[in-house]
Amino acid sequence: MAEAWSPPTRPPLIEGLVNGVDRYNPSNVSILEDYLYHQIRSQEYDCLANCAILKLYQFNPELYNPDVVINILIKALTASPLPDFNLCVSLLDERPINATLEEPDPVPALLPTLKLLSDLLYKCRFPAFWEHYQSDELEHLRDNYTVECVGFEDSVREVAIRAVRATFTKISAERLASYLDLNGADLTAFVQDKGWKTENGVIEIPPNADNQIEATVVQENIKLAQLTKVIAHGAKN
């Protein structure tokens, strides 16, 4: 969790902005926006820095940039199951509506779709996520926004992989394919890249702290004096 709030890729300049009083200085919004676009191009992610942009938009509605907001929300989707997306939305819900825009704000129209995608990821409904994401209805989102976010689909697959690692010791290739929206050679290459073994269509997930079942022995120590009180109380009743 600490790494999520302070990623090692965060530059010293941004570290100073997000952890000091300058995070509320509107003259720094362009620096934070440039850092967001760096994240989009490099597959890096910094929730705290992106939230700083949304806070500046709250305090300074004239700075509001809907494309930046949508990019922040798209990056936050890939942090599931962490609450980053809902945190960003909560900051949006408090945004003043008097920002001056030359064109209609696309955020209100896209927000229900992004919320649905976030909900599907949080609930680990990965096949439903891919079906909705790849639908004709979301062509506008793919062609205008997620296409600009380098590695977006691979980042979503990592969300699925985190869930698979925590849940399974073995999973069928067919099921994993539906979680990752990959088939054939693409799925084979993905599994090989993870170093996982496949046998007869079943993929073995290496042991880890989350997918191993361990018996737990619970031992209670009751002192004689306590037991005597319990017996005496029962005898009175």
Image (cartoon, rainbow, N blue to C red):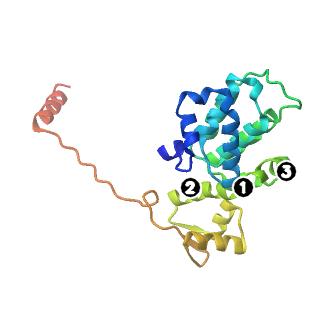
N-term-proximal mark, 3 vs 1: 3
Q: Mark 3 or mark 2, which is nearer to you?
A: 3
Q: Mark 1 or mark 2, which is nearer to you?
A: 1
The image position of residue 15, as x and y in percent, is 54, 40
Alpha carbon of mark 3 to alpha carbon of mark 2: how far? 27 Å
Q: Are marks 1 and 2 in contact (CB under 8 Å)?
A: no
Residue 20 has which mark? none
The image position of residue 48, as x and y in percent, is 58, 38
Would you call the spot at circle 1 few (<14 residues within 10 Å), some (14-19), or many (20 or more)?
some
Q: Amino acid at mark 2?
A: Ala
Label 3 secondary element: helix
The image position of residue 154, as x and y in percent, is 67, 59
Residue at image coords 42%, 58%: 209
The image position of residue 236, as x and y in percent, is 16, 25
Q: Is residue 189 above or below residue 48?
A: below
N-term-proximal mark, 3 vs 2: 3
Residue 163 has which mark? 2
Q: Nearer the viewer, residue 189 or 221?
A: 189
Residue 139 has which mark? 3
The residue carrying mark 1 is 150
Q: Amino acid at mark 1?
A: Val
Residue at image coords 65%, 54%: 43
| Residue 25 figure quarter | top right
Q: Is residue 121 above or below residue 22?
A: below
